[in-house]
Amino acid sequence: MVTLRSGSLSLDLAPSIGGAIAGFRHDGVTLMREIPEQALREGLVRQTCCYPLIPYSNRIAHGRFSFEGVEHRLALNFGDHPHSIHGNAWQRPWQVVEADDARCRLALTHRPDGDEAKGWPFAYRAEQLFAMSPDGLVLTLSLENEDHRAMPAGLGLHPFFPKRPGVRLQFAAERVYPNGEDSLPLDGVPVPDDWNYRTMRELGEPRLDNCFAGWNGTARIAYAQENIALRIEADPLFGHLVVYVPAERDFFAVEPVSHMNDAINRPEPSRHGLKVLQSGERLSAQVRFGVEVLS
């Protein structure tokens, strides 16, 4: 575990567990969900506070895609889920490159040798740079293509937040992709009232697990009982936002991502946010978590 501190904020990192965040607090108040000790002992990354989505976000249908005339098949890496999900960086140990009291850089080098090709068939290097200040956390994600071929690429972040009584959420997006029965997105539609958080409102139980497009890059979460708010600001690369609010669970997720779910299998993937990195090219963008004490 690596712990960073600045002012009243502390951040725990678990590099060996998918490069995940294992705690984010302000004066003892948890800003991301609590992690059971057993989950840390057993390395259960899906129960952590936040993990990176590299080299793609969310689902790739049935783990299959075609790129530049070559068919690829990925491992189905999410329990009994029928699709590949969230890339492979969250399932690999990361290395600490540098660290001090308020800053830490983690790195992951992926080589598609043997079974590793089932995680992702292209070689890459990824980094996460965590920089703390008294006002919040800046997280810089980067992905470099180290393969001899071009590769499709995306970035994302999967933070979880506690679903406390009275928690409020605000974000604005142009449209949303409803999921079909196969958990894959249908065509985009205007955001329905039940899923419209353009004005700050109580989170409720909207049963959301959908990707929003045309996101303006900001979101705000307010905990009135704790007198604290968290403002999420993301670089323009993150033009999509996945919001996951499972019913009757004690957490929810607000995920800045670069592309829609299963973008790689859509006509004109770049129109849906997916990038193509040539050999040696690098993709980098920031997500900022600003912490505000409410009066």
Image (cartoon, rainbow, N blue to C red):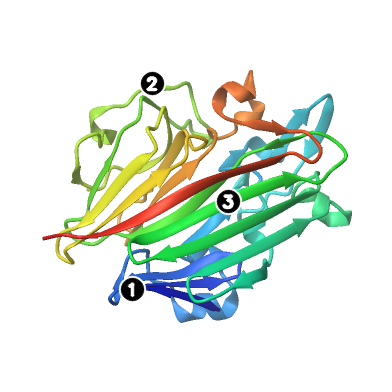
Residue shown at 48% from the left, 52% from the top:
158
* Quarter residue 100 falls in: bottom right
Q: Amino acid at mark 3?
A: Leu
Neighbor class of circle 1 (other Cα within 10 Å; few <14, some 14-19, many 20+) is few
Question: Label 3, on which residue?
Answer: 141
> Is 52 on the left or on the right of 169, as rendered?
right
Residue 32's place in the image compared with 40, above or below, is: above
Q: Position of residue 70 (x, y in %)?
A: 84, 29
Q: Could you tell which of marks 1 and 3 lies nearer the N-terminus?
A: 1
Q: Which residue is mark 1?
A: 7
Left or right? Give the position of 9 relative to 95. Answer: left
Q: Are marks 1 and 3 in contact (CB under 8 Å)?
A: no
In this orientation, which residue lies closer to the viewer: 67 or 141? 141
Measuring from the top left, give residue 121's x and y in whole percent.
80, 44
Q: CA distance from mark 1 to mark 3?
A: 24 Å
Q: Earlier in the sequence, mark 2 or mark 1?
A: 1
Give the vertical position of 232 relative to 62 (above or below): below
Q: Which residue is mark 2?
A: 189
Looking at the rendered structure, the secondary structure element under dot 1 is loop
- Real-space CA distance between mark 2 and mark 1, rounded to the nearest whole angstrom: 43 Å
Residue 54 in view of the camera: no
The local secondary structure at tag 3 comes to strand
Quadrant of residue 282 within the rendered picture? top right
First in sequence, mark 3 or 2: give its number.
3
Q: Amino acid at mark 2?
A: Val
